Image (tube, rainbow, N blue to C red):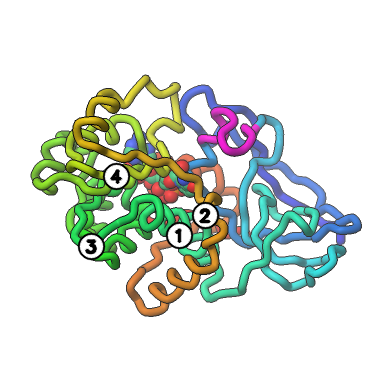
Amino acid sequence: MSGPNRQILLKSLPEGQLSTSNFQLVDGERPTPDDGEVLLRNLYITLDASNRAWMQGATYRAALTAGEVMYGRALAEVVESRAEGIEAGEIVYAESGWREWASMPGRLVQKRPNTHPLSHQLSVYGISGLTAYFGMIHVGKQQPGDWVVISAAGGAVGTIAGQIAQIGGARVIGIAGGPEKCAWLTREMGYHRALDYKAGNLRDQLREACPEGINLYFDNVGGEILETCLPQMANNGRIVCCGSVSTYDGAPPPAGPRGVPGLLVTKRLIMSGFIVTDFNAGRDRALAELRGWVESGRIKVPEDIIDGLENLPAALVGLLAGENFGKRMVKVA
Ligand code: NDP
């Protein structure tokens, strides 16, 4: 099946902040699948803060390199299959890149149910929802009555993590950028309070909002916000290290946060990092529980869907700048 195939290259690695000029839209050929491969038409491409982190160097996956089609994960439709056990018309999740069409070995794609809306497979039933679920319940061991603080609270992981904590009986405080996002968190996402880190005085805001101290801090941003939260932790508090988006885009992060060893000892804190795939064995159970909460209306799923493959670079730059309310993705077809 021949035809055009628009794709976006990571033209150069950013030296400072990521910009749309690091990308280039090019025309390519639609590939033909070999034996064992499937031809995929990308439907939705997910945008994640970690897309930028992978440009800095190897983490739990290899670093991205310039000159190649931008790495990306997508929900795609199988248009032609030469792989056993996969049929044309099925929906799959694949690392199929920032392009319209891709040919990939069938063993590298994962089948997904054709839920309505399909986009939920990238948000609440995708990496973001599962990260929120395992981070809050298994790593953070959230308890009823806890004072829970979540940073990047209005993002893909943060919005779901906040609602899971509310279901678990916690009092939940979000940290986010700007008065509009903070108002939305309390009005639409059920947050008890939302603190605007861009307004300054986060330390005072936290003290006032959470006078008994933080029992569980779900850290998506690292850096200065983590450093500000540490002294506000209650004794025996838990810190879930989910990510450090404040260090992904721009100059290498300064050393820190300061004060960690002393505070961990005197406040008897536990700081735990995790990667969502550590919990693959519990995935089906987590998805069933998330589905129950979504279907009963206890979890709202905010999605920020942008149309058009050509808008992927600006959408990623905008995500890092905090434009997104909830899970950002681009609809390609
Ligand atoms: P989000 O949808 O949360 O978007 C990122 C948000 O981060 C922005 O909207 C912005 O919101 C905020 N942000 C950007 N820069 C800063 C800054 N300097 N200081 C504070 N906040 C900032 O992204 P994701 O849901 O994709 O990711 C959230 C975190 O979860 C990331 O750290 C990511 O790496 C991590 N993650 C971890 C996984 C794991 O397995 N451990 C799996 C998936 C994600 P604002 O308007 O508030 O500034």
Q: Nearer the viewer, residue 150 or 300?
A: 150
User: SS for tag 4?
Assistant: strand
Q: Residue furthest right?
A: 35
According to the picture, the residue beneath numbered tag 1 turns out to be: 129
Left or right, residue 155 beside residue 4: left
Residue indicated by mark 2: 279
Image quarter for ligand 1 equals: top left
Q: Looking at the image, is mark 3 or mark 2 earlier in the sequence?
A: 3
Q: Secondary structure at mark 1?
A: helix
Label 3 or label 4, whichever comes before in sequence order? 3
Callout 1 amino acid: Gly
Nearest the eye: 176 or 147: 147
Give the image location of residue 192, x and y in percent. Answer: 18, 59
Q: Please give the residue where the numbered disc 3 appears in the rendered image.
A: 144
Instruction: Say which of 261 and 309 sits in front.
Output: 261
- Give me the C-alpha separation between circle 3 and circle 1: 20 Å
**Disc 2 residue type (three-letter):** Phe
Q: At numbered mark 2, what does the secondary structure look like: helix, strand or loop?
A: helix
Dot 1 alpha-carbon crowd within 10 angstroms: few under 14, some 14 to 19, many 20 or more: many
Q: Residue at x 78, y 67 (%)?
A: 79
Q: Which residues are magenta?
A: 53-64
Q: Residue drawn 51% across and 35% down?
A: 53
